[in-house]
Image (tube, rainbow, N blue to C red):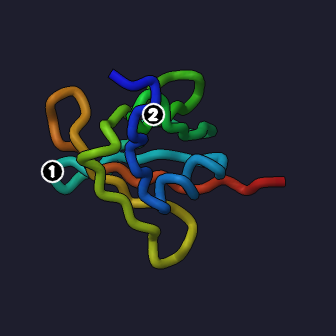
Amino acid sequence: MSIFSKKTAIPPQVEYLCKKSLSRVIERAGGEEITLGGKGGASVCGGELVIVCDGKEVFRCDIKGITAAQLMSGNGCDIKGVSSGATRHIIAYYGKNI
């Protein structure tokens, strides 16, 4: 086994998301929008996307199965992935970087 392992490719939308602060994160489930938290950030750790809001982890997903797209308004990112064995659909809205 080599000490040099192949890195998992990170989608460009996820890389951009990790550079921004988040104002709020919502989850779409069954036609409803549930607020998961506000004032947070995102990072990629160990091949997983982790989103933390208000000091609590609200979403964790393996990068390999993620689908991410920039919102047409440019103020957030739409993310779909498997978290805790269930497929989840969240929207992370960017905060204002001052």
* Amino acid type of the residue tagged 2 in the rendering: Val
At 65% across and 50% down in the image, what residue appears? 19
**How far across and down, in percent of the image, does residue 25 sit?**
47, 45
On residue 6, which mark appears?
Answer: none
Residue that carries the numbered disc 2 in the rendered image: 50
User: Callout 2: 10 Å neighbours few (<14), some, many (20+)?
Assistant: some
Image quadrant in which you'd find residue 94 = bottom right
Residue positioned 42% across, 41% down in the render: 7
* Residue at mark 1: 30
Please tell me which residue lies in front, 56 or 83.
83
Rendering coords of residue 89 (x, y %): 27, 50
15 or 6, nearer to the observer: 6
Q: Residues within 10 Å of mark 1 (few under 14, many from 20)?
A: few
Q: Quadrant of the N terminus?
A: top left
What is the CA distance from the residue labelled 2 to the residue labelled 1?
23 Å
- Look at the image and tell me in which quarter the C terminus lies: bottom right
**Rendered residue at 47%/52% (across/down):** 92
